[in-house]
Amino acid sequence: MEWDSESEGSNGDEEEGFLLSGGSGGPFSFAVEGVLGPASSCGLVVSDALEPDHPIIYVNRGFEESTGYRAEEVLGRNCRFLQCRGPFAQRRHPLVDATIVSEIRRCLEEGIEFLGDLLNFRKDGSPLMNRLQLTPIYGDDETITHFIGIQFFTDTNVELGPLLSSAVKESARPNRLITEHVFRPVSLGHTHICREFCSMLQLSDEVLCQKIFSRLCPRDIASVGSVCKRLYQLTKNEDIWKMVCQNAWGSETTRALETVPGAKRLGWGRLARELTTLEAAAWRELTVGGAVEPSRCNFSACAVGNRVVLFGGEGVNMQPMNDTFVLDLNSSNPEWRHVKVTSAPPGRWGHTLSSLNGSSLVVFGGCGTQGLLNDVFILDLDAQSPAWREISGLAPPMPRSWHSSCTVDDTKLVVSGGCADSGVLLSDTHLLDVTMEKPIWREIPASWTPPSRLGHSLSVYDGRKILMFGGLAKSGPLRLRSSDVFTMDLSEDEPCWRCITGSGMPGAGNPAGIGPPPRLDHVAVSLPGGRILIFGGSVAGLHSASQLYLLDPTEETPTWRVLNVPGSPPQFAWGHSTCVVGGTRAIVLGGQTGEEWMLSELHELSLVSSIINVKEDD
Amino acid sequence: MAKMIKLVSGDGAEFEVEEEVAFQSKIIKDIVADADDVIPLPTVSSKVLIQVIEYCRKHAAVNSFPLSPSSSAAAAASSSSSISYSKPVSDPALRAWDNEFVKLNNSSLFDIVIAANYLDIEELVDLVLETVADRIKGKQAQEIRRQFNIENDFTPEEEEALRRENSWAFQNN
C-alpha cells in the first residue's frame, strides 16, 4: 500500500484529513486517501515524536471501532496499551511477541519504517491481530515530529481463556487466573502446599478488578487502595470506579449521573467520594426563562434526565388544570416550554408525578373537577408526538389526593395513604406494574400499617425498599404532623412495615440523633447508596424548613444527622414541586413565599461540585 | 446405571463420579466427548479435587434443568456490559449450602478457585471470588492486609498521605 506522506491538500475520495501543528514550523495539513479501505477494520494513529514516550494525538474512527477504545480514553497515552489485555491489565500480555516489540522500539529509535504483525487486544479483552505500519513524519528541519501508525486489524483465534494472564507453565493447559509474577514455583501435585506469600495477589489484575473489586462499595475501594502499591494502582482506574458506582447505586442512577454536565470531568472516583461525603453540597439560585401560564399552585413536578416536567395544578379560581410544561436544564438558557400533547388527562391537583424507566412519567390520582381520581396516565417525553396514555389497571385503589408515590425497579408504581372522599385518611399501599400487558393493581397486605396520613413522602432505597416519612397523621381523634420513619422491603415474600424512629410511636423511645421536626408535604431525596435527605414542607412551630436532615436506613441503628450546606436555601420547599435531576441536584420550584409560585426563580441544592466550580484541565 | 467418569488427581488418587457431576466442568465435558473416560488432572491435588467434586455433586441436580427464558433474561439484565457473573443461585437451600462450603481459609479457597478455573466451572469460580469480596467488605486496610497476608510496601509518609486522601471513606457523615 503506497501513500505519499507529504501530500498536501485534499484528493477526490479523501477519507481522512486533519490538521497537525509541527514543532517549530507552522501548521501543515495532512490528507490520507481513500485507499485505507473500509474504515471499520483500519486504524490510523498519530503520535507526537517530540513529546516523551510518544503520546497519541489523534486516532480515527476506524481505530475506535476496531479496538473499542474511544479517542478521549487514549489521547495522551503511548500506543502500547493495546498490548495489554483490557483496560485493567498493567502488563503486556505474555502472548505478545517480545521480539516484535523490540523491533518496533528499534525502528522508532532509528527513525525508520516498521512493518509487521503484532497481537493486540480490544477494550473488552478480545484478541486482535494488528498488521502495523509505522512511518516517521519529518518537520521542516528534518527532525522527526510525528509517527503515523496504520493498523489493519483482524480477529484472531488465539486461545486465551477467560482470564489468562500468566506465563505458560509445565501444566497441561495455561492457568488462567494467576499473574506472571509468581513468587516461587508451586507444585500443585503435592497434597500439602505451604504458602508464605499472599495468594490473593497472585490473581491477575482483571480478576481482581472485575470479579472482586467490582463487588465492593466506594468506601471499601478506598480501603483496598490503601493496602499496597499494586492495589493502589488498580484502584486509581476510573473504569473500576464506574463499575463500583454502578453496582452500588444501580445502573439507572449511574446513567442519570453520566448526563450531568460536570460529571465527566469529575470522574467516577470523585463522584463516588462527593456523593458519599456530600462535601460539595451547596444551595444555588437559578433564573430560567419562559413561563408557566396560567399561574397555579399544587402542581406536581418530576425530572426526566435533565428535564423538569410539570403537570396540572390548581388555578387562581381553584380550577384543576391539565397542561404539561418542560424545563430543559441542559440548555444554556433553560426556559419553560408548554408541551403540546395530543391528549391530556383530566385536570387535577394534589396528584403525584413519578418517573419511570427511560423518558416516561406516570400520574396517579389527585382531585379533579368531578372529585377525587384514581386513574393512571403515562407520558413518554421522547416520543415523536408525546401523548398521555391512560393505563387501565384492574382493581385500582380508592380515589385519593395528597397521597405519596414512588417507582420501584423503574417500572412499578407504588402508592400509599392520602385523603379519600369525605376527608378520611388512608393507610393502604398499592403496587402497579405498568409494563405488564394487562396491568393489575395489587394491594400490599400488611398485618400492621402505620397510622393513616396524607402529605407524607415515600422514597426508594437499596433496591426494593421503601421509606415513609412524616405527613399529617391520624392520632386518636386528632391529626398531627408526624416525624415517624417506616420502612418496608418489597422483595420479601410477606413485606411488612417496620418503625425505624419516630416521635409518636408507642415503645419507639427517643428518636436516635437530632431528628427533623414533624412536618408534611416535605421533600425527600434518595441519595445513591441508600441515604434519604429530608427538608422543607409545612413544619410545626418556629422551626426552619430549610434545614437538611440525613438518615441512613441501612445502618444498624439508623441515626438522623444534620447537614449544613453553604449558600442560601429557599424559604419554603414543597414535596410536590421539588424534583431530583440527574441524581445529583434537587430543584425547588416556587418563589419567595409559599403563596407566590414564581417559577422563574428556582433554588437548586446541588450535591456534587457544579460544572462552574470544577477546575479546567488545561 | 449412570455413566461413570474416572478422575485422577495429581497425586495419583482415583475418583469415580457420575457423568452429570463431572460435566459441571466444561473442560471434562469436552474431553469426554472425545471418547475418553479416564481423565488425568495432574495440577489438581486430591484434597482439592474431593472438595470440587463435592460442589459439583451438589450442583449437578440444579443444573440438569435448562434455564427458563425468564431467568436467563433476568440474569442477563442484572449483569452490566463490563462485569460478568454467572447466574445467581436462586434456591435458598443451595445458597445456604454454598455459604457453608466456602467457610474455608483463604489458602484453601485459593486452591479451589485455581482448580475450578482450570476445570472451567464458572459458578464455583464466581462463588469463591464473591466470598473473597465479602471478606474485604467493611474492613480497613490493615485488616485486609492481615486477612490476606499482604505486605505493606508503603513508606510511613506515603501511608500518612493515603490516610488523608482516603479519610472521606472512614468518617461517619
Image (cartoon, coloured by chain):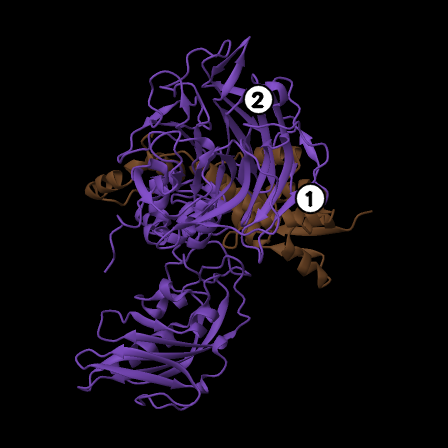
Left or right, residue A374 beside residue A175: right
Query: Picture coordinates of residue A498 (x, y %)?
Result: 54, 20
* Disc sitting over residue A466 in the figure: none
Q: In the image, what residue occupies the spot 57% across and 37% down?
A: A408
Query: Residue A249: image x %, image y %?
Result: 46, 41
Snapshot quadrant of residue A131: bottom left
Residue at position x 22%, y 39% in the image:
B160
Residue B102 showing in the rendered view: no
Between the C-alphas of marks 2 and 1, the distance is 26 Å
Q: Colour of chain B?
A: brown
Label 1 secondary element: loop
Amino acid on which disc 2 is placed = Trp
Chain letter tied to purple: A
Image-quadrant location for residue B142: top left
Dot label at residue A497? 2
The residue beneath circle 1 is: A436
